[in-house]
Amino acid sequence: MGLYIHIPFCIKKCAYCDFNSYAETESIPLYVDSLKREISFYAGMNRSVTSIYIGGGTPTVLSEGDLASIIEAIYGAFNISPSAEFTVEANPETLSRRKLAVLRDAGVNRLSLGLQAFQDELLKMIGRIHTAKGFEEKFFMAREEGFDNINVDLIFGLPRQSVDDFRYSLEKLADLSPEHVSCYGLTVEEGTEFYKLQKEGLLPMPPEDEERMMYRMAREILGERGYLHYEISNFARPGRECRHNLVYWTYGEYLGLGAGAHSFMDGVRFYNAYGIRDYAGRIKSRGRSVEGEEPLLPEEQQAEFMILGLRLIKGVSKAEFYKRFRKDLDMVYGRVLEVLKEKELIAEDGEYVRLTEKGLDLANEAFVEFLPERPADRQ
Amino acid sequence: MTIPQDRIRNFCIIAHIDHGKSTLADRLLEYTGAIPQRKMEDQILDMMDLERERGITIKAKAVRMIYRAEDGQDYLLNLIDTPGHVDFNYEVSRSLAACEGALLVVDASQGIEAQTLANTYLALEHDLEIVPVINKIDLPSANPDSVKREIEDIIGLPADDALLVSAKEGIGVKEVLEAVVKRIPPPSGSEDEPLRALIFDSLYDSYKGAIAFVRIMEGRIKPGQKIKMMSTGRTFEVTEVGIFSPEMVSTDSLRAGEVGYVVAGIKNVKDTRVGDTITDAENPAEKPLPGYKKAVPMVFCGVYPADGEDYEKLREAFEKLQLNDAAMFFEPETSAALGFGFRCGFLGLLHMEIIQERLEREYGINLITTAPSVIYRIKKTDGQEIMVDNPTNFPDPSKIEYIEEPYVEASIMLPSEYVGAVMELCQEKRGNFKDMQYISEKRVILRYDMPLAEIIYDFFNQLKSRTRGYASLDYEFTGYTKSELCKVDVLINGEIVDALSFIVHKDKAYARARQLVEKLREVIPRQLFEIPIQAAIGGRIIARETIKALRKNVLAKCYGGDVTRKKKLLEKQKEGKKRMRQLGKVEVPQEAFMSVLKMG
């Protein structure tokens, strides 16, 4: 199984961010304490952990001591596979040589750095606290401290971002040669600062055609530079795909700990209380903080298997589907597949069903077709 | 207790929407103890939910009260409630015919409105005694003197003794009852004459069948009696008669001057047509009461189930609604775009909206309705004359000799400052000015001859918005007039969508076609391919818009914590798609079919 640990703190909230994260430090001691208790609550689970991902927020706003103690608690509680991938997300501005060394020594073998763009004006506009130069410094520092598996995040389709801006970011990043690149098309989510601006008509988003041009460009340039496009928004050197995230896309099991974290196990999705106080309160009284659970019917699991699996460029394996559900993919979704092939959104390569190039731009149009009728509709 | 005929009073209330008719009726019922206060639901006369919400009366109703007057005598008062909308003008005239007097209720700050005026004239035609009542005198903006002047100047009624009332506050209620007793004459028909009873409304009851609401003009009616409907000659045997108090209570008989109901094993409301005369089958009256006419639908539209599986359910719902509404017409029709449905005829737009709302609410059927149309009279070159209520049946222009369309005389009452704006509107709507009359220094009546088609095409909304809600409208069908009309077809992705075709005056075809294609471009969501939207007369394209292909619909991120939320998003998209109609390859939302009406 995969293990996810959520750290809901940031120095500053970015204008596009709708994650569970707060720009405050007062509740850090309470949170770290609660998290360690939650980790120990799950001690003795006999599932082997094949990947660990500490995400946020910005996990690296925590001190070296806090980080080390959380990691120690993880090792104390879980059965970690020796070859496990262990990622920590970081904002360049929160990294120091010492912190990097502490993480490295604690067994962290992969870093995920938020860069987003190489233009300082863009970084400032979207609320990032680092500069392009600051990022480069920390990137090299991480290399020096022995990190040989680094992901860097980019965003395209930002307000005022030109196609040339993004090309520059892609090329510059490829020159640094990280093992993994995530390229996200900006989505303006409700509750964010961008959302407010957009409602007031103050967010000059690039036209849709340009945004799609940037996406195609990412695939082209990163492809030329030796990266494999393996998921809608993710690129990696061969063999460096993010194993933790592959757990999600291949519909594997994972345990999520920390405020608002989601888990999926034995066909049930369950999730923790969202707010920090609420989360900590439940941990204190009950040792765990599960707030709700959603058992998934077979047809819901099949739909999710497809919707997540089709995010992978190679697609969904029919054999895997059968192994999982004891049903032929063609039996369950034959008609849907026909319709989607007709619309040129998906293609079949023998064993695999995958999104076409057009399908990559219009994935949701394909995904909705897999959703089961809701119980209320069936009456 | 028998009250002699000279102490019976039959009256109705004429009022504009919101001028307080229902509240006043409630107070009268309360005062006379017809309904104990604790049992009073607000506004007892507006029984349907819809009536209550819209603040209008759709069906006529009656209620009986016993009032002990200042002279110490008990009087029997029958209040007959009349529908308050132009669509139901004929029903109004029948309700009036059942009365000897009317309370003319006018809002003390608003003054007389077009509808009130039309109904008052109608009441005067029936020789009713009019008692002016100025309501809402408690409001700070009340100006009873100016309202009195209006009543005198416009209607020509003396208004010195107009009653000053606040139904809401209960002021002047007793004075109203006294005026009903003293000023409205008792009914005059004789009990000894052969039976003549006027049907002013009817109701369908699943146990008793069609129940006729009647005013006995002459003679008597009682259970066991054989009766005859004078318009059809059909006979029935009376099983029950009774009064409204206000629920139906059976009695031994009804006699000349009284108001009540008749049950006679009648299976269909078509046999209890409003305006018809009931007489005794064995001792029939020589002549029916004057004024019967069959209500004729004026406005037609297609009504389709949004989900094709609801077709049978829709048919059953129509059949049930028709049990209570002889004026509504429906017959099956098929549309290439919308599948199986019905072509329906209504008295007017309000009638249409009410039926549509009842189908959706009371029967839970999701509907797609096409834009309403009037009936055109088309003379073909082969000499044949056809009536066309559906643009789909519009003949090939080369085979048309001429076309006629229904015209109405519209009366619009409005504050004089808006005269310019309203005249402009009437011109735009192809109106021909008839006359203008000042009813006071500040208020004016405008009269125009106008095509009915223009009235049902967004006229009332425009009128309200151009006069900030201060204008009122009444209209009356006057006849058919030759007109230069053509049919405009709409093509979506190259295919004609029959349900979107419309008939329009030649001078307006371009503008309206342009508006419609623009509107369709807005309401049809982008799809995986580019969609041309065109409007055409015959084979000639007169307007075009293009819906660009959808380029992007993808979630950038989906990790473990996102699945639930992202799935909800997809479910929402799926729901949206389910409400669409598939026209060829194109998914069209239901509101698109109403775009023809809603633009402009």
Image: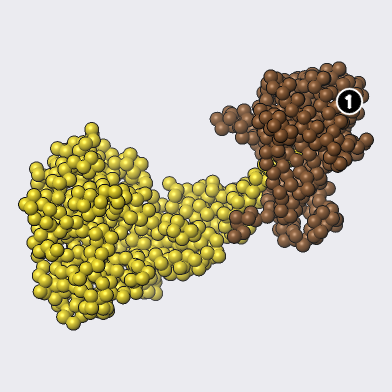
**Mark 1 nearby-residue class (10 Å; few <14, some 14–19, many ≥20):** some
Q: Position of residue B94 (x, y in %)?
A: 22, 63
- In the image, A66 versus B147, the foreground residue is A66
Q: Quadrant of the N terminus of chain A?
A: top right
Color style of the picture: by chain
The correct choice, above or below, for B107 with respect to A349 in the image is: above
Using residue A84 as the reference point, say whether residue A289 is left or right of it.
left
Q: Is residue B418 visible?
A: yes
Determine whether B172 is above or below B253 in the image: above
Tint applied to chain B in the drawing: yellow
Query: Is the C terminus of chain A in the top left, top right, bottom left or bottom right quadrant?
Result: bottom right
Task: Using the rendered view, name the quadrant where residue B149 is placed.
Answer: top left
Dot 1 corresponds to which residue?
Answer: A106
Tell how many labels. 1
From the rendered image, report the letter of the chain displayed in brown. A
Residue occupying image coordinates x 79% and y 46%: A251
> Residue B6, position in %: x, y?
8, 61
SS at mark 1 in the image: loop
Q: Residue at x 63, y 51 (%)?
A: B574
